[in-house]
Amino acid sequence: MIDVLSKQELLHLLTNNSRYQIAKVTGISERTLANYVNGITDIGRMSYDNAIKLTQYAKENNLD
């Protein structure tokens, strides 16, 4: 099982980094990322696949 970032860490990642760049690398749409940041979609309801992609992005870019 892969350890993923906590909800707080995911939100920090999305608010302090370019959502355009994150979307480009992970394949998660900018709209989806913005929805998490703006509270339109609860970050706790994020798919496990998206959480893994964001965690891998953070680790590969030394952002974790």
Image (tube, rainbow, N blue to C red):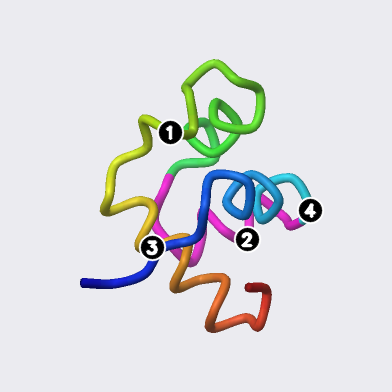
Residue mark closest to the camera, 2 vs 4? 4
| Mark 3 crowd level (few <14, some 14–19, many ≥20, 10 Å Cα) | some
Residues under labels 3 and 2: Cα distance? 13 Å
* Type of amino acid under label 2: Gln
| Mark 2 crowd level (few <14, some 14–19, many ≥20, 10 Å Cα) | few
Pick whichever, 20 or 12, lies toward us.
12
- x, y percentage for residue 42? 48, 24
Label 3: which residue?
A: 53
Label 1: which residue?
A: 44
Which residue does the image show at 35% across and 62% down from the upper left? 52
In the picture provided, is 17 more to the left or to the right than 60?
right
- x, y percentage for residue 57? 51, 71
- x, y percentage for residue 56? 44, 73
Q: Which residues are magenta?
A: 17-28
Residue 21 is tagged as 2
Label 4: which residue?
A: 16
* Type of amino acid under label 3: Lys
Furthest-left residue in this view: 1
Residue 41 against residue 17 in the figure, above or below: above
- Could you tell me which secondary element the residue under label 3 belongs to? helix
Q: Please identify the dominant SS of the magenta region.
A: helix
> Would you say the residues marked 3 and 1 are in contact, meaning their CB atoms lie under 8 Å apart?
no
In the picture, residue 26 is in which quadrant?
Answer: bottom left
Nearer-N-terminus badge (2/1): 2
